[in-house]
Image: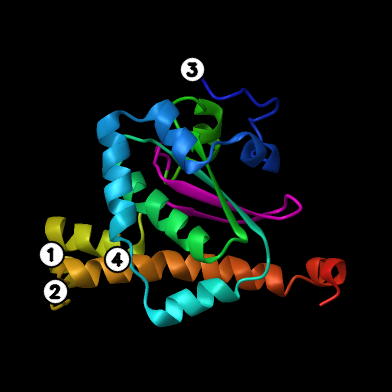
Amino acid sequence: MNQPSVPGTAMLGHALFENALPYAEFLSQYGTPSDQARWDAQLAKVTFTDDQRELLRSFTRECHLLVLAGAWCGDCAKAGPLLEACAALAPVLRVRYLDRDAHPEVQAELKINGGDRVPVLVIFSEDGHEVLRFGERTLTEYRRAVQAELPKLLRGAKILSAEETHAAIVADWMHELERAQWILRLSPRLRRLHAD
């Protein structure tokens, strides 16, 4: 079963968000039982600091988070559950997923460095304006890859434990969500709309 086709998807737009799938439906439609178990296990592992929880609860501007993903993808299985955990604390964050293979025209628009990468996050304002794009791995994840593959480039850099790595990846994603929130919160257009 394919997700509904969206007219005009060659240009990335907010209509894609409205036609994308929530977490459980995305995994049910595109994931195997093994994929679903992996995503759910990751969701159970997500932890936040007290400051991160407080920050998420302070968000007031509605954000529409469109995630281009693959249920099979290991990076997606980390990012998707983390975004879901953020949305559980900040109900103004609405998260939806598009399957990469079911939407090749979206993948073509969201290439990173000329490649088909996932996950790619696109954040829209409540009224459908694109705010930012982010993908596919965080800075912490790239530093880990460089330490493994090109260690001379990060000579002397501390190798993080699994727990420290998880905390740093959460912080990386939180920075992007916070950035989007402040872009929206300071938007003159939205401040007029909300009279704040």
Question: Is residue 136 visible from the viewing direction of this image?
Answer: no
Residue 50 figure quarter:
bottom left
Instruction: First in sequence, mark 2 or 4: give its number.
Output: 4
Label 3 crowding class (10 Å Cα cut-off): few <14, some 14-19, many 20+? few
Instruction: Report the span colored magenta.
Output: 114-136
Q: Which residue is mark 1?
A: 151
- Residue that protrudes farthest toward the bottom in the picture: 51
Disc sitting over residue 155 in the figure: 2
**Mark 4 residue type:** Thr
In the rendered image, residue 115 lying in the magenta stretch gets the answer yes
**Disc 1 to disc 4, C-alpha distance:** 14 Å
Instruction: First in sequence, mark 3 or 4: give its number.
Output: 3
Judged by depth in the image, the label closer to the viewer, 1 or 4, is: 4
Q: Is residue 190 left or right of residue 136?
A: right
Callout 1–callout 3 Cβ contact below 8 Å = no
Judged by depth in the image, the label closer to the viewer, 3 or 4, is: 3
Residue 30 in the image: x percent, y percent?
40, 28
- Name the quadrant of the C terminus: bottom right
Q: Which residue is mark 4?
A: 140
Instruction: First in sequence, mark 1 or 3: give its number.
Output: 3
Residue 195 in the image: x percent, y percent?
86, 74
Q: Is residue 166 left or right of residue 185?
A: left
- Residue sitting at x 14%, y 74%: 155
Q: Which residue is mark 3?
A: 1
